[in-house]
Image: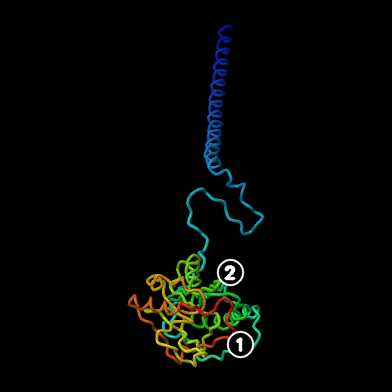
């Protein structure tokens, strides 16, 4: 009886031991399965974490309310997706020969009232300060037109009315400088021209051609091109007040042109001529003494109308001219 009881207990112990072993195996299997899941979870978290640290605004700055919102940057160099703007067209050079569109002989009259508002309205392409650049070609020169001035507002309006269209038809890049002598002291035309030369270069150092024009002289032919050449240029060779003839061979008054290099070569204009006359003859002598020669247009083209006026006070003929 006792032997039977002992065998039964032995079998029960073995069964309990097997159950315990089975339970241990199941627990080990479950443990490793849970560990593997946790390991995968933390691996995913650690892989996502640095991306957020490098680009914290990757999701927060995307504006989803705009259908054309730009995706946030990844922090890496990217090829630009913006299309480059259209390049400015390369304009051809302006023609050296008389450009198309010139009229030729012009009808010049000074009887119609000329308000400045009309001049502005007729020249919409001219910028503030009398600056103009052709829209369809690139000029070879940049021209500064210098006007010595005092108490001639009436003449200046006519001059601007006629000259702006002429200069635009000639395809010039130009600026107009009215150099006013303040006060009532004796007028000094040549000194004002020197001032205009310097002031124009202060505003635009690219000026390489300078036209010096009296405010009361208007060309009667737009083929008289306001440009500079290899020699100093005398434009106003046939004025109406001289019967459309050159008054004498050495005359260089009215309207003339010199390149920047030519102006510096003669050391500018004389400053000592106060009152009317003499300075243009001095300029002619300076040009001749430096070995240069005067060039002139054909007499049928270099015709000018002068606005009639009384001689200005404090601009009497210079007795030492």
Above or below, 135 against 240 in this view is above
20, 60: nearer the viewer: 60
Q: Position of residue 148 (x, y in %)?
A: 53, 75
Most extreme residue toward the top is 2
Mark toward the viewer: 2 or 1? 2
Q: Position of residue 83 (x, y in %)?
A: 52, 63
184, 6: nearer the viewer: 184
Discs 2, 1 touching: Cβ within 8 Å = no
Residue 25: mark: none
- The residues bearing labels 2 and 1 have C-alpha atoms spaced at a distance of 26 Å
Residue 182: mark: 2
Mark closer to the chain start, 2 or 1: 1
- Location of mark 1 (residue): 110
Residue at figure coordinates x 58%, y 74% from the top left: 150
Most extreme residue toward the front is 319
Q: Position of residue 48 (x, y in %)?
A: 54, 41
Residue at figure coordinates x 46%, y 82% from the top left: 253
Q: Is residue 257 left or right of residue 163?
A: left
């Amino acid at each position: 009886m006792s032997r039977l009881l002992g065998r039964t207990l032995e079998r029960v112990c073995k069964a309990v031991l097997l159950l315990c072993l089975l339970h241990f195996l199941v627990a080990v299997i479950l443990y490793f399965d849970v560990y593997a899941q946790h390991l995968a979870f933390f691996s995913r978290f650690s892989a996502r974490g640095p991306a957020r640290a490098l680009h914290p605004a990757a999701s927060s700055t995307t504006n989803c309310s705009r259908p054309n919102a730009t995706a946030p940057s990844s922090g890496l160099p990217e090829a630009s997706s913006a299309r480059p703007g259209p390049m400015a067209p390369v304009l051809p050079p302006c023609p050296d020969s008389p450009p198309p569109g010139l009229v030729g002989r012009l009808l010049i009259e000074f009887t119609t009232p000329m308000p400045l508002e009309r001049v502005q309205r007729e020249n919409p392409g001219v910028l503030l300060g009398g600056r103009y650049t052709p829209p369809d070609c690139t000029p070879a020169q940049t021209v500064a037109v210098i006007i010595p001035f005092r108490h001639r507002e009436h003449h200046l309006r006519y001059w601007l009315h006629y000259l702006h269209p002429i200069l635009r038809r000639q395809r010039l890049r130009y600026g107009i400088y009215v150099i006013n002598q303040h006060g009532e002291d004796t007028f000094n035309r040549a000194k004002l021209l020197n001032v205009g030369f310097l002031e124009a270069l202060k505003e635009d150092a690219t000026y390489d051609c300078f036209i010096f024009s009296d405010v009361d002289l208007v060309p009667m032919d737009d083929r008289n091109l306001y440009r500079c050449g290899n020699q100093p240029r005398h434009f106003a060779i046939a004025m109406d007040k001289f019967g459309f003839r050159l008054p004498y061979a050495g005359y260089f008054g009215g309207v003339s042109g010199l390149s920047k290099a030519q102006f510096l070569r003669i050391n500018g204009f004389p400053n000592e001529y106060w009152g009317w006359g003499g300075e243009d003859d001095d300029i002619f002598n300076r040009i001749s003494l430096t070995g240069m020669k005067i060039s002139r247009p054909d007499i049928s083209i270099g015709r000018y109308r002068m606005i009639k006026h009384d001689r200005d006070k404090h601009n009497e003929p210079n007795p030492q001219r």
